[in-house]
Image: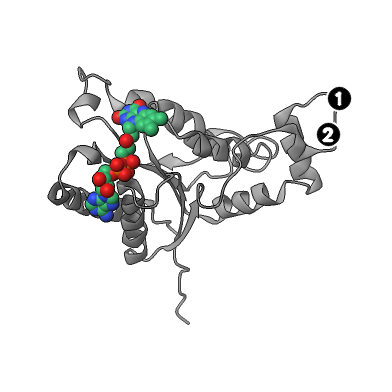
Amino acid sequence: MPTFDAAPTALIVHAHPEPRSFNSAQMAVAAQALRDAGYQVDVVDLYASDWAPVLAAAEFAPLGGQVFKPQAEQMRAVRDGTLDEAVKEQVDKVLAADLLVLSFPLWWFSLPAVLKGWVDRVFVMGALFGGEHGFFDAAALAGKHAVLLFTTGGSHEMFQPGGAFGPQDEFLFHIHRGMLEFVGYQVLDPVVSYGPAHLDDEARAVALEEVRKAVTVTAENARPSR
Ligand SMILES: Cc1cc2nc3c(=O)[nH]c(=O)nc-3n(C[C@H](O)[C@H](O)[C@H](O)COP(=O)(O)OP(=O)(O)OC[C@H]3O[C@@H](n4cnc5c(N)ncnc54)[C@H](O)[C@@H]3O)c2cc1C
């Protein structure tokens, strides 16, 4: 009897406030490239779904202790099966996906607050790392891949060594190492469109085609070996 592998799965978490932005178009191109590569794609649009980004005590009420210790409460909620419904839904999506794509415009060299808040609430101690899991290679997402898909205001030259903003790998470190590798992911090369607002329509079309090609490579590199 032949066996048929299930399609690989990708979760795109998108954080741009304007659906008509280049960034949102870039996300749609990436989603289609993944589908064309055989992935089942799930998109979480944080602005459209009005994601609440603040990790706060109310989510864990009644608290297990006198004072609010976020990670202790996360561990307790995982153990007792009392995680907030919205958070649990996202944790399940993360655990189910072979590839996580964080899609965003670069804001202050980092993630928009709504996406940082998604990480704050969804990268739950006890579910993705810590507790029965370890950290980095021993964390729950070990063996899976993650990639950043973003746009910038600055040009490509500005992100080179000696450029005004300096090498992009340096300021992506807190996301790559501090968030994604910390929970076990193997991080793939980011897919970036530099300064789309400063391009003409023709150059923007070329940039979207470059995204399609780069994400096709990402899809191959993230394909699970089952
Ligand atoms: C708070 C804040 C902090 C920031 N910090 C930084 C920073 O640290 N470093 C940095 O480099 N930049 C920074 N920026 C700039 C930001 O990264 C860029 O403005 C953003 O990434 C540009 O992408 P966009 O999709 O928002 O552009 P948009 O302005 O939406 O898009 C550019 C153009 O593309 C057009 N377009 C839309 N769809 C398509 C399509 N399908 N095909 C062709 N064209 C299309 C749009 O109509 C528009 O004319 C910051 C911005 C903010 C608001």
Depth check, front residue: 145 or 14 = 14
Query: Considering the numbered disc 1 on the image, is that residue within a helix, a strand or a loop?
Result: loop
Q: Which residue shows up at 45% across the image and 44% down it?
A: 15
In the structure shown, which secondary structural element does the residue marked by tag 2 occupy? loop
Spot occupied by residue 120 in the image (x, y as percentages of width and height) = 59, 35
Residue 2 x/y as whole percent: 45, 79
Q: CA distance from mark 2 to mark 1?
A: 7 Å
C-beta proximity under 8 Å, tags 2 and 1: yes
Up the image or down, 51 lies above or below 93; here it is above
| Mark 1, residue position | 66
Where residue 140 sits, quadrant-wise, is top right
Instruction: Residue 203: tell me if it is visible.
Output: yes
Horizontal side of residue 23 vs 6, given as left or right? left
Q: Quadrant of residue 220?
A: bottom left
Amino acid type of the residue tagged 2 in the rendering: Leu
* Residue position for label 2: 63
Residue at x-position 70% and y-position 33%: 56
- Say if 177 sits above or below 216 in the image: above
Any part of residue 189 in sight: no
